[in-house]
């Protein structure tokens, strides 16, 4: 029996600051219908797919940004998306800003979160972004902020995987895709398909030389992650010019060979669809990347025992003179 899953990248174009949740959810339901007509069983939406990418603005008082976050999922405004997906028998993954409340209604945590929902409407799991990029203080000299580290704590649960959609699936969010550890920790749990939503400004203020490489780096990290771990990867953008900031589109579905199976052509709302044959992963995980046979964890201790770089000591100038 083959395990073929039809998966769709539901790329979104810009979401304006004044666009309501209702308008956004209407766009998402339209994408869901397009994907369903193409036979999709799992539809993947971007990171922070319900609002504009608000970390581009500095807020002195975080409470003034509470309206960007969801305190329940589904919420009243997103319920129609959940209902329509269940009616169509299509599963989905959706990124959103999550604000956790205590019993008194006080905010206790803010996370950059993705929820995955099965075809029957059952929630598979939540993933909270681990690698939170950017800065946590105001940097007014930038033409736009990337203050994710002010708006979100790193997710506390790490990289879990779930049995769903006939296989083992995982989630990652945007900057997570640039770190090989993200994929490997999931691959060590048998992941077969990883979904990822992203918002990637093309201009990178700390090093504008990287701007022309934004698309190359996006494909490079996800294709390498797929190949080196023998997994499918579905990378989905919120692209186009949003509130004056140009964001990368180039959503793609990548097979365990590392090759792109499908990709979007525009920078707006668009579906790209591919048949992910989960049994094809064994061609890689059972051969060149047979972890049990070939990995050498006894030499990987630094990966978890240290965070930054520790170069070898400088040679003693006295000794070499
Ligand atoms: N959303 C997100 O994680 N974006 C980052 C932008 C670069 S870091 C300022 C990314 O890795 O694409």
Image: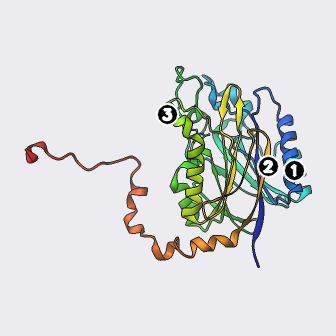
Q: Residue at x 59, y 35 (%)?
A: 148
Answer with left or right where residue 291 lies relative to residue 85: left
Circles 1 and 3, Cβ within 8 Å, touching? The answer is no
- Reply above or below: 19 against 70: above
* Total number of numbered discs in the rendering: 3
Colour setup of the view: rainbow
The nearer-to-camera label among 1 and 3 is 3
Respond yes or no on whether mark 2 lies under 8 Å from ligand 1. no
Separation (CA) of disc 1 from disc 2: 7 Å
Rendering quarter of residue 226: bottom right
Q: Secondary structure at mark 2?
A: strand
Quarter of the image where the C terminus is located:
top left
Circles 1 and 2, Cβ within 8 Å, touching? The answer is yes
Rendering quarter of residue 314: top left
Residue at far top of view: 141
**First reached walking from the N terminus: tag 3 or tag 2:** 3
From the viewer's side, name the closer residue of 243 and 216.
216
From the viewer's side, name the closer residue of 130 and 213.
213
Q: Residue at x 66, y 31 (%)?
A: 246
Residue at numbered disc 2: 271
Q: Secondary structure at mark 3?
A: helix
């Amino acid at each position: 029996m083959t395990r073929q899953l039809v998966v769709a990248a539901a790329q979104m174009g810009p979401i304006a600051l004044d666009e309501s949740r209702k308008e956004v959810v209407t766009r998402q339901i339209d994408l869901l219908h397009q994907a369903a007509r193409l036979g999709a069983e799992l539809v993947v939406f971007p990171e922070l797919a319900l609002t504009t990418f608000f970390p581009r603005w500095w807020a002195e008082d975080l409470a003034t940004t509470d309206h960007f976050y969801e305190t329940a999922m589904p919420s009243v405004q997103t319920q129609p998306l959940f209902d329509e997906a269940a009616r169509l028998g299509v599963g989905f993954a959706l990124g959103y800003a999550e604000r956790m409340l205590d019993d008194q209604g006080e905010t206790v945590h803010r996370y950059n979160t993705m929820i995955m929902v099965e075809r029957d409407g059952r929630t598979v799991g939540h993933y909270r972004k681990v690698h939170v990029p950017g800065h946590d203080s105001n940097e007014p000299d930038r033409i736009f902020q990337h203050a994710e580290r002010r708006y979100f704590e790193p997710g506390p649960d790490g990289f879990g995987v779930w049995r769903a959609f006939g296989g083992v699936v995982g989630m990652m969010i945007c900057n997570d895709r640039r770190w090989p550890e993200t994929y490997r920790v999931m691959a060590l749990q048998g992941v077969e398909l990883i979904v990822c939503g992203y918002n990637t400004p093309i201009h990178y203020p700390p090093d504008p030389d990287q701007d022309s490489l934004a698309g190359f780096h996006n494909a490079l990290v996800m294709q390498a992650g797929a190949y080196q771990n023998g997994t499918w990867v579905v990378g989905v953008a919120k692209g186009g010019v949003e509130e004056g900031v140009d964001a990368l589109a180039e959503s793609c579905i990548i097979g365990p060979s590392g090759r792109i199976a499908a990709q979007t052509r525009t920078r707006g709302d668009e579906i790209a669809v591919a048949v992910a044959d989960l049994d094809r992963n064994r061609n890689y995980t059972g051969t060149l990347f047979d972890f049990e046979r070939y990995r050498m964890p006894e030499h990987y201790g630094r990966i978890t025992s240290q965070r930054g770089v520790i170069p070898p000591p400088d040679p003693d100038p006295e000794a070499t003179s």
